[in-house]
Image (tube, grey):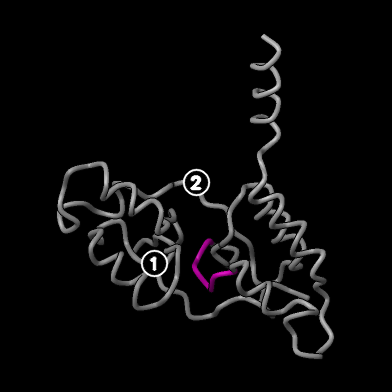
């Protein structure tokens, strides 16, 4: 199964100049939790999540219309391609502890979004009797890695407990 078989093909996005109020409105009306930040050519240059927006709005003491997505977006983008195997994309999600990936073409242009919600709806359990390359074990393992502690944090915790 390929990412293109599972991804959402009509992604919402925003520009770095989008104010936070408008970004929240996009998230609300499109029922999504992450917006790829794109430049004028639709190349993905960052991402902003609902959590990023909430933290910024709650800590910066500015009105939503006075802050831009560019001020709070993460410039580090973890993405996949439509032709990637779904399991490779899930490994990327697990490795970087993200539940959503922008789907980009070879030039970094936005083509869609892959979310764990999309993945779950295409598992053997969620496929309503249709065959699927995704097992519920694949999904559970990925979610455990996304939500579980990363190895460096576990090592640090053990080291702190020893001292």
Q: Secondary structure at mark 2?
A: loop
Residue name at image x 48 percent, y 80 percent: 10
**Image x and y of residue 85, in percent:** 76, 67
- Seen in the picture, residue 44 relative to 83 is either above or below; the reply is above
The tally of labels here is 2
10 Å neighbourhood of mark 1: few (<14), some, or many (≥20)? few
Q: Secondary structure at mark 1?
A: loop
Residue 113 on the magenta segment: yes
- Seen in the picture, residue 153 relative to 138 is either above or below; the reply is above
Query: What is the number of the mark on residue 41?
Result: 1
- Seen in the picture, residue 18 relative to 160 is either above or below; the reply is below
Query: What is the number of the mark on residue 76?
Result: 2
In the picture provided, is 159 more to the left or to the right than 35? Answer: right
Nearest to the observer: residue 106 or residue 150: 150
Secondary structure mostly seen in magenta is strand
The segment highlighted magenta reads 108-114
Q: Earlier in the sequence, mark 2 or mark 1?
A: 1
In the picture provided, is 26 more to the left or to the right than 92? Answer: left
Q: Quadrant of the N terminus?
A: bottom right
């Amino acid at each position: 199964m390929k990412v293109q078989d599972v991804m959402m093909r009509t992604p919402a996005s925003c520009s770095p100049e989008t104010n936070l109020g408008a970004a929240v409105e996009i998230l609300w009306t499109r029922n999504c939790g992450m917006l790829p930040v794109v430049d004028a050519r639709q190349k993905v240059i960052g991402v902003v999540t609902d959590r990023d927006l909430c933290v910024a709005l709650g800590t910066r003491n500015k009105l939503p219309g006075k802050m831009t997505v560019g001020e709070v977006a993460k410039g580090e983008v973890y993405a996949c391609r439509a032709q990637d195997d779904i399991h490779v994309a899930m490994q990327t999600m697990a490795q970087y502890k993200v539940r959503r990936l922008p789907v980009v073409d070879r030039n970094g242009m936005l083509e869609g979004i892959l979310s764990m919600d999309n993945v779950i709806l295409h598992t053997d359990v969620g496929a309503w009797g249709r065959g699927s390359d995704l097992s519920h074990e694949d999904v559970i393992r990925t979610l455990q890695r996304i939500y579980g502690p990363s190895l460096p944090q576990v090592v640090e915790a053990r080291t702190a407990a020893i001292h």
